[in-house]
Amino acid sequence: MTTEIYFLRSLGGRGEELLEAEEYYGYFAEAVDDDLHRRGGPPLPCLLSFTQGKITHSGTLLVGNKAAAGSKRVNISKIRKLVEPIRTALLVVGLASAQHRRSLQEQLRRSGLIAGDTAVALLEAIHLIAPSLAIEIDRFECDRERIALLPSR
């Protein structure tokens, strides 16, 4: 089972609208590029950026139905404002591998799924910078492993 973390970047007015919706409804929905390749399944940790160059919030992402051609609806709930925003440049610099740095840098320029070795490297960097956030993300991995052990019925 590969590690997966979703990164949602929503700057300016749209970011403010999403935060207002979360405050009112307890969650928000957004149409994102369809790189998730699934519907339903276990929730994913979501890192949210509402400020240029910083991760400002974390949340729980559930993949929904197709929203339009090439996009899917995601529902993000349990949104928590980070006490101290994390500079994305600091995360990129914290990665040991140049390949992972390039991959993460590209992912942080847009919204999208960060998976595999790059997600593992990102999680290691988060462990050093924001241990409480890393513990929160690790919880998702434990849940996914437990779900995978359930019988298909």
Image: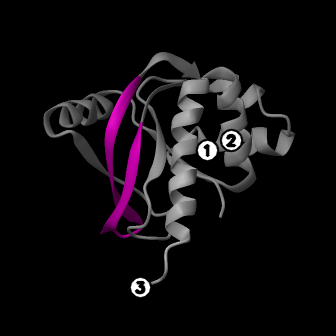
Q: In the drawing, does residue 138 fall left or right of residue 25?
A: right
Distance between the Cα atoms at labels 3 and 2? 37 Å
Image quarter in which the C terminus is found: bottom left
Q: Which residue is mark 2?
A: 104
Task: Give, as a three-letter code, the residue at label 3.
Answer: Arg
Residue at image position (85%, 34%) is 96
Task: Give, as a three-letter code, the residue at label 1.
Answer: Gln
Q: Residue furthest bottom?
A: 153
Task: Find residue 41 and name its label.
Answer: none
Answer few, some or many: residues within 10 Å of disc 2's Cα (few below 14, many 20 plus, some between 14 and 19).
many
Magenta residue span: 59-81
**Residue 147, x across and y down, in percent:** 49, 66
Residue at image position (54%, 30%) is 133
Given residues 1 and 153, the one toward you in this image is: 153
Q: Which residue is mark 1?
A: 107
Whichever of callouts 1 and 3 sits on the residue coming sooner in the sequence is 1
In the image, residue 49 above or below residue 113 = above
Q: Are marks 2 and 1 in contact (CB under 8 Å)?
A: yes
Given residues 110 and 84, the one toward you in this image is: 84
In the image, residue 70 above or below residue 49 = below
Element marked by disc 1: helix
Q: Which residue is mark 3?
A: 153
Element marked by disc 2: helix
Element marked by disc 3: loop
Look at the image and name its color scheme: one colour
